[in-house]
Amino acid sequence: MSKVVVVGGIDMDITISVERHPRPGEEISGWDLTFLPGGKGANQAVAAARAGAEVRMIGHVGHDPFGDQLITFLKGESVDVTGVERVSERATGMAFITIDRNGENTIVYDGTLLPSLSFGNPELIDPGDVLVSQFEVPVRTVVEFFTEGRRKGTLNIFNAAPPHPVGPDLMRLIDVLIVNEFELAALTGRPSVDPADRAQVERALELLSPPDGKAVIVTLGAHGAVVADEHGTSWIQARPVRAVDTTGAGDAFVGALSAALAMGRPLHEAARYANVSASIAVTRKGGGPAMPLREEVERVY
């Protein structure tokens, strides 16, 4: 079985629950202030590991208590941290998350703490691995990472989050591009994409027009997901659940998808599996700790 290698952010999520999100200039009270392991890269690595894959994480944390806690957490989740650096010039990344009664969140992260990471460790990648990254590290880092993967025949998965243009140098290295409705809108120059409007989603996918041989998956929360590849477009129905916190839903999807692909599942089957994983994750609070175990997904898959 191939392993999953993730390059991405590792941070501490500081979450608080609120009745509703505040308006500009408004002060409101909240409850249940919590510090939880997070970062899109770390969440995706943990999701893949809990789905049964062998996983290696590449990123960095600071020489501080948050960094200590995050390294301990990843090791406890059987994630290989050989590629995680401890750096003295930066603090460990942090994200500030408010969660309303419906489980919807707003997230603010300190962009100055994002890893100024470069990829210079080709020995961390083996032929046939599944590589995963996002926009929590510099684009040049992702290009270096995926370029090395191309040399070794890897499958390259990219989650275009937070939203940012995907240039041609990066696009040509991506095998599977994963976005949500907000990221799809940003990539296609639209003000918004209504996740409940299938025709609108499909028109946006046509505007994205991925090169031949590439696949695009759009995750749409309570409206399921859609997979578009050279064989056409197929929709995946959402699994009805009561959402508690949607913070890690996309990361659960990406991690579970990468694990399923590393185990040899076809893309459309892997996407259905990942959709179930995401539906379980939103019933729990937090990022990394909310990622479901393989047996939990298999029970309802």
Image: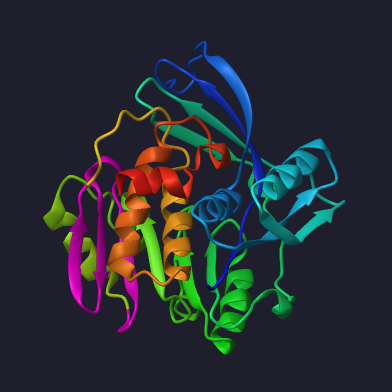
Is residue 288 visible to us here? yes
Residue at figure coordinates x 82%, y 54% from the top left: 86
Residue at figure coordinates x 24%, y 79% from the top left: 230
Left or right: 17 in relation to 201: right
Residue found farthest to the top: 29
Residue found farthest to the left: 199
Residue at figure coordinates x 63%, y 77% from the top left: 144
Left or right: 191 in relation to 245: left
Left or right: 201 in relation to 150: left
Above or below 293: residue 178: below
Above or below 185: residue 117: below
Colouring of the image? rainbow
Above or below 216: residue 113: above
Q: Which residues are magenta?
A: 211-237
Residue found farthest to the bottom: 151
In-front residue for pair 115/124: 124
Above or below 277: residue 34: above
| Residue 20 coordinates in the image, percent (x, y) | 39, 19
Residue 230 colored magenta? yes
| Residue 286 coordinates in the image, percent (x, y) | 53, 34
Is residue 189 visible to us here? no
| Residue 71 coordinates in the image, percent (x, y) | 75, 47
| Residue 250 coordinates in the image, percent (x, y) | 42, 49
In-front residue for pair 181/269: 269
Q: Quadrant of residue 246?
A: top left
Residue 56 colored magenta? no
